[in-house]
């Protein structure tokens, strides 16, 4: 190809730009399809847990005679979420590991605190920590759902 003519140079540049643009659009489409597929999985796997079951299980917990009680329902729910996350052990192990760590951290904390007799001040601190741990769990899910992880 002789590039001595200006129109030949412009045509070659146009071809290169078209190819780069098509490749970039394919990359964006592929990435968006993956995000949409994972969003469908999320709706199927987690919407019931995150919107209804986990908040209701959290609401059942209480302190009685200084001890955190009625934690079995939330522990069962955290375990159910972890079991429903097994798909991601193969599809996105980093996400699976992150969520597994956060779920277990809350489970362990609830069990440990459920064995102690706490003052009113300590009880308030426990509620704050539980709230923070739940927010962290929801943040991990939200980041994955929106494609930020």
Image (cartoon, rainbow, N blue to C red):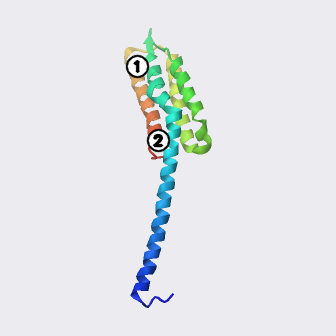
Residue 26 image offset from top left, x and y in percent: 50, 60
Which residue reaches farthest right? 90
Which residue reaches farthest top? 65
Q: Look at 58% across and 32% down and name the residue there.
A: 84
Residue 7 image offset from top left, x and y in percent: 40, 85
- Res 66 seen here: no
**Residue 64 is drawn in which quadrant?**
top left
Q: Closer to the observer: label 1 or label 2?
A: 2
Q: Nearer the viewer, residue 42 or 125?
A: 42
The kind of secondary structure element at disc 1 is: helix
Q: Look at 47% across and 33% down and name the residue there.
A: 137
Rate crowding at label 1 as few (under 14), some (14 to 19) or many (20 or more) other CA atoms within 10 Å: few
- Res 47 seen here: yes
Residue 5 image offset from top left, x and y in percent: 42, 89
Rate crowding at label 2 as few (under 14), some (14 to 19) or many (20 or more) other CA atoms within 10 Å: some
Q: Nearer the viewer, residue 123 or 71?
A: 71
- Work out whether 144 lies above or below 105: below
- Work out whether 111 lies above or below 92: above
Residue 87 image offset from top left, x and y in percent: 60, 38
Q: Nearer the viewer, residue 38 or 14?
A: 14
Give the number of marks: 2
The kind of secondary structure element at disc 2 is: helix
Q: Which numbered circle lies on residue 145?
A: 2
- Work out whether 44 lies above or below 61: below
Q: Look at 51% across and 40% down and name the residue there.
A: 40
- The residue identified by callout 1 is 122
Tell me which label, 1 or 2, sits earlier in the chain. 1
């Amino acid at each position: 190809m002789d590039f001595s003519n200006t129109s030949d140079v412009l045509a070659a540049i146009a071809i290169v730009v078209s190819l780069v643009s098509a490749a970039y659009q394919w990359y964006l489409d592929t990435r968006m399809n993956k995000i949409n597929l994972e969003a469908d999985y999320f709706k199927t796997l987690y919407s019931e847990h995150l919107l209804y079951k986990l908040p209701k299980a959290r609401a059942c917990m209480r302190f009685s005679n200084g001890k955190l009680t009625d934690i079995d329902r939330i522990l069962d729910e955290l375990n159910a979420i972890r079991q429903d996350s097994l798909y991601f052990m193969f599809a996105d192990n980093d996400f699976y590991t992150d969520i597994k760590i956060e779920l277990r951290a809350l489970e362990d904390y609830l069990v440990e605190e459920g064995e102690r007799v706490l003052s009113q001040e300590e009880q308030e601190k426990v509620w704050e920590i539980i709230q923070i741990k739940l927010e962290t769990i929801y943040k991990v899910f939200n980041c994955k759902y929106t494609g930020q992880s």
